[in-house]
Image (cartoon, rainbow, N blue to C red):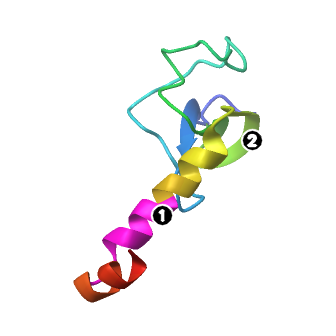
């Protein structure tokens, strides 16, 4: 890789829509490796996480992925909450 290429590492969090987001301007230097379940500085709650490497602002590699034990339940609840928030008052009453 040439010296004039931009290389960045970042930790991302999966969204309820199955996309990925960087929850904060969090730059990770990649030296710590995959998180442990008690790594509160990184694992901010139930979710799926990944570390990526960007080269020239494009994703070059997914270095690791990590899923908390309660991630599936968390995403199901988030999707249900989003679905309910989109319903009209009539539809909401019918759901209940």
Could you tell me which residue is drawn at 66 percent across and 37 percent down? 52
CA distance separating discs 2 and 1: 32 Å
* Residue located farthest toward the bottom when viewing the structure as drawn: 90
Given residues 29 and 48, the one toward you in this image is: 48
Q: Quadrant of residue 68?
A: top right
Q: Nearer the viewer, mark 2 or mark 1?
A: 1
Q: Is residue 13 above or below residue 66?
A: below
Q: Is residue 62 above or below residue 75?
A: above
* Residue located farthest toward the left when viewing the structure as drawn: 89
Q: What number is the disc on residue 61?
A: 2
Q: Secondary structure at mark 1?
A: helix
Residue bearing mark 1:
80
Mark 2 Cα within 10 Å, few/some/many (few <14, many 20+)?
few
Question: Where, quadrant-wise, is the C terminus in this rendering?
Answer: bottom left
Q: Residue 65 at x, y = what percent?
A: 73, 35
Q: What number is the disc on residue 94?
A: none
Report the span colored magenta. 79-88
Could you tell me which residue is drawn at 31 percent across and 80 percent down? 93
């Amino acid at each position: 890789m040439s010296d004039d290429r931009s290389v960045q590492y970042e930790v991302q969090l999966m969204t309820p829509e199955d996309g990925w987001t960087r929850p904060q301007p969090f730059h990770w230097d990649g030296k710590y490796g995959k998180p442990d379940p008690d790594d509160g500085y990184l694992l901010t709650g139930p979710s799926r996480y990944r570390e990526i490497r960007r080269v020239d602002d494009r994703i070059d590699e997914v270095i690791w992925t990590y899923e908390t034990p309660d991630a599936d339940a968390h995403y199901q609840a988030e999707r249900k909450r989003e679905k309910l928030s989109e319903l009209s008052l009539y539809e909401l009453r019918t759901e209940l």
